[in-house]
Image: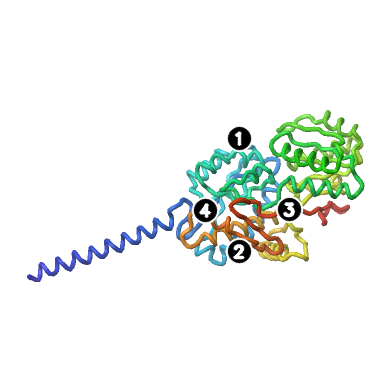
Amino acid sequence: MSAGRRAHGMLAAALGVAVQVLAVQIVAMQGASADPGVSRTAFRIGQSAGVTGPVAGSVKEQIAGAQVYLNTVNAAGGVGGRKIELVTYDDGFDARRTPDNVRKLIQDEKVFALFMVRGTPQNESILPIIAAEKIPLVAPLTGAITLHRPVNRYVFNVRAKYQDEVARAINHLATSGMNRIAIFYANDGFGQDVYEGFTTALQARGVQPAGTASYARPMGDIGAGVASVHKANPQAVLVIGSGSEAARIIREMKRAGSEAQFVTLSNNAADSFIKELAEDGRGLIITQVVPGTNSSQMTLASEYRSLARRQNVEPTNAGMEGFMSAKVLVEGLRRAGPEPTREKLVAALEALRDFDLGGILISYSPTRHTGSSFVEMSIVSSTGKLIR
């Protein structure tokens, strides 16, 4: 064989090997990025929440808390060498805007999963999109029963249900000798869910609501509702609404002369809400689904305090929920393996059993997507501090 033919043959063989290597590399790269939002270097995670509007204060605290943990993980190299990028779209706490935000996050931002979408109607509005896209939603910021029952394969709740909070609050009030309990609630999916839990908890004790009033969103004149509830002379009033709504109800009830014990739920467990209420917040009871930031009993709290202060972030109760939620998200991503897909993330979370966040255990299964049932009570002190 001539030298020219040998050279040509060697070149062809070398090119063949190069093509094979390139093909293997392309297949490997495709395998690594089979689903949108995951590359060799990053996970893109999407969120729609009210960064502006009536819940802006608590949303910002929740995002800051989540970012404390994500920053820590990213500084240590991320998950499998991938940094976690949180892409947040503002919906102004308007459920009509949430579906468009989520579509853009999926289609334009190419996110891998959804995380900490805030609000009951907001989360309910995107359930059809989640089902169609088969995209996981981790830690929705709501305790609505509709996200727990029936079990949605792609929704993983971290916090307890609102109805669990209501039952705990009613039990606390009853053991304090109060049985004339009223409710003032938002007339939407969130409020109706809480109202159902409220009436069920009272019926279990053989009593009826002392008074009820509701309001439509956006909140208008609530004078008639205030007068109706005040006239019933309840010993306690459960106030159900977003931060600014609940603050207004409490203020107007007090201006009307009410001396009732006011109670609200964990969606208002934020420093911004307590500051907004100022003097009118003294003695307010707030149910909690996360440990207090100053807890000495749970390492979750001390870990959050330590990491937050290192990053010059003020630890808050709302921030604790974000921090806790981020820990669950990260663990799911870790367990999804070196070649993660959305289906692998779903499978990894459904296999999570007794995962210790630092005093709170998170467990899921194919038939249970409620991670935690932790609920406790807190009260706003005379100095405006939230104590347990």
| Residue 44 circle label | 4
Residue corresponding to mark 1: 96
Residue corresponding to mark 3: 289
Q: Is residue 96 visible?
A: yes
Residue corresponding to mark 2: 72
> In the rendered structure, which amino acid carries the disc numbered 2?
Thr
Give the quadrant of the N terminus.
bottom left
Q: Residue at x 36, y 58 (%)?
A: 27
The relative height of residue 51 versus residue 229 in the rendered view (above or below) is below
Q: Position of residue 146 (x, y in %)?
A: 65, 42
Around disc 2, counting alpha carbons within 10 Å, would you say few (fewer than 14), some (14 to 19), or many (20 or more)? some
> In the rendered structure, which amino acid carries the disc numbered 1?
Arg
Residue 132 left/right relative to 301? left
Q: Is residue 51 visible?
A: no
| Residue 381 circle label | none
Q: Residue at x 74, y 45 (%)?
A: 163
Q: Secondary structure at mark 1?
A: loop
Q: Position of residue 110 (x, y in %)?
A: 48, 48
Q: Nearer the viewer, residue 80 or 340?
A: 340
Give the quadrant of the C terminus.
bottom right
Disc 4 versus disc 3: distance between alpha carbons? 27 Å
> In the rendered structure, which amino acid carries the disc numbered 3?
Val
